[in-house]
Image (cartoon, helix red, strand yellow):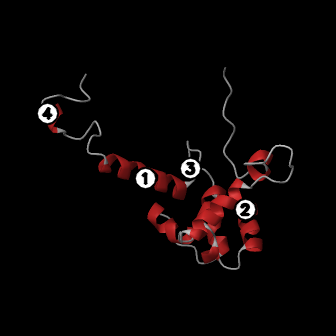
Amino acid sequence: MHHPAMKSDKEFSFPIRNQLFEIRGQPGSGVDLVAVNIMRGRDVGVFPYNNYRSLAGLRRASTFDDLKAEMDSSNVEALKRVYADVNDIDLYTGIILERPSVGAAIGPTGGYMIAEQFTALKKGDRFFYEHQVPSTRGLKIGTT
């Protein structure tokens, strides 16, 4: 089977927004995964989106309009309607609304965070194939 992937955007399907864990025969009993993800971030004290922008090499936004370099104007206008201040934007929301980087499915902040996580997983795994493990000394990984 071959089905091309859909373009990445801010839209989520109806089942993801309304029917996650829905009890069969009980319409409306499902959960909104997007809302759950936002609440998870708030529950564990994840800093707002603006705090992570500088880590990804972006300038910290002082106003909502500062976000227009990374987000479509319509998304920035939606953020203005929902959040009182640019420093209130939830991390998950900000990442989802960023314009995807060239050749990527997500924008610069989300891309930075994923790259950092993979780096931490690799460096934290003493058995990762590129690390020198005593039982593999003498083997030349990457040359075969």
Q: Identify residue for label 2.
A: 75
10 Å neighbourhood of mark 4: few (<14), some, or many (≥20)? few
Find the distance from the CA under tag 3 to the CA under tag 1: 18 Å
Query: For residue 64, which quarter of the picture?
Result: bottom right
Mark 3 lies on a secondary structure that is loop
Most foreground residue, 102 or 124: 124
Q: Observer-nearest residue: 66 or 117?
A: 117
- Image point (64%, 56%), residue name: 96
Residue 71 seen in this snapshot: no
Image quarter for residue 140? Answer: top left
**Badge 2 density bin: few <14, some 14–19, many ≥20, Cα 10 Å:** some
Amino acid identity at mark 1: Gln
Q: Secondary structure at mark 2?
A: helix
Quadrant including the C terminus? top left
Residue 16: horizontal and vertical position, in percent?
73, 48
Residue holding disc 3 = 101
| SS for dot 1 | helix
- Tell me the mark number nearer the camera, choosing from 4 and 3: 4
C-alpha distance separating marks 1 and 2:
27 Å
Marked residue nearer the N-terminal end (3 or 2): 2
